[in-house]
Amino acid sequence: MELKDRVPESLRNNVAIVKLDELFRWAHANSLWPLSSGLACCAIEMMSTATARFDLARFGYEVFRPCPRQADLLIVAGTLTYKMTPPLIRLYEEMPEPKYVIAMGSCAIAGGPFADSYSVIEGVDQVLPVDVYIPGCPPRPEALIDGMLKLREKILHPERAEAACAGLAQEAERK
């Protein structure tokens, strides 16, 4: 007998039965609080997602926090240099668990046009674990919104993300 079968017939349309983990994942996925930090030109596009034209608030993500202790999403928007790496790592370490990272723009993903420079890190994933990559130079606000929605799906359905990673690993082993 399933749990939903134990609910009386008169209450079945008024009561929702979910696992507590699923409820917490749903709440967390629909209320991400990004840290307001930007490294370069991609930060302008990140800021414009909160304007009325793109309206990031409709997804529940409009609260850009000024303090890392209140944020759970770090958006690395722009070129990461060796000089800026320790402060960025410190911001990440000060964020409470669970925390997520989005690499926004070709500079954050692979160094962009500055990849051959002596002072630029060729990808944020060399220093932080990245959850979502958003390509572009700079990516449009719609791309950031799409990346945040992909992160929401990753939080809501971690089993899908693990299955996709396992499938990619198997494909890489075959090659």
Image (tube, grey):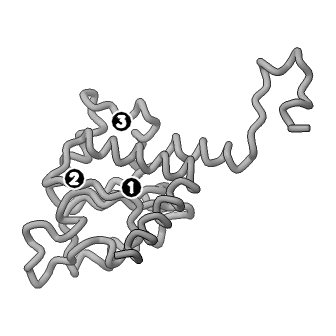
Return the disc, 3 or 1, that comes first in the chain's sequence: 1
- Mark 2 crowd level (few <14, some 14–19, many ≥20, 10 Å Cα): many
Q: Which residue is mark 3?
A: 56
Contact (Cβ within 8 Å) of mark 2 with mark 3: no
Q: Quadrant of residue 100?
A: bottom left
Specify whether 103 is left or right of 93. Answer: left
Mark 2: secondary structure: helix
Tell me which amino acid carries mark 2. Answer: Ala
Q: Which residue is mark 1?
A: 35
Contact (Cβ within 8 Å) of mark 3 with mark 1: no
Tell me which amino acid carries mark 1. Answer: Leu
Residue 43, numbered label: 2
- Residue in front for this viewpoint, 174 or 23: 174
Residue 4, above or below 64: above
Residue 1, above or below 115: above
Q: Quadrant of residue 130?
A: bottom left
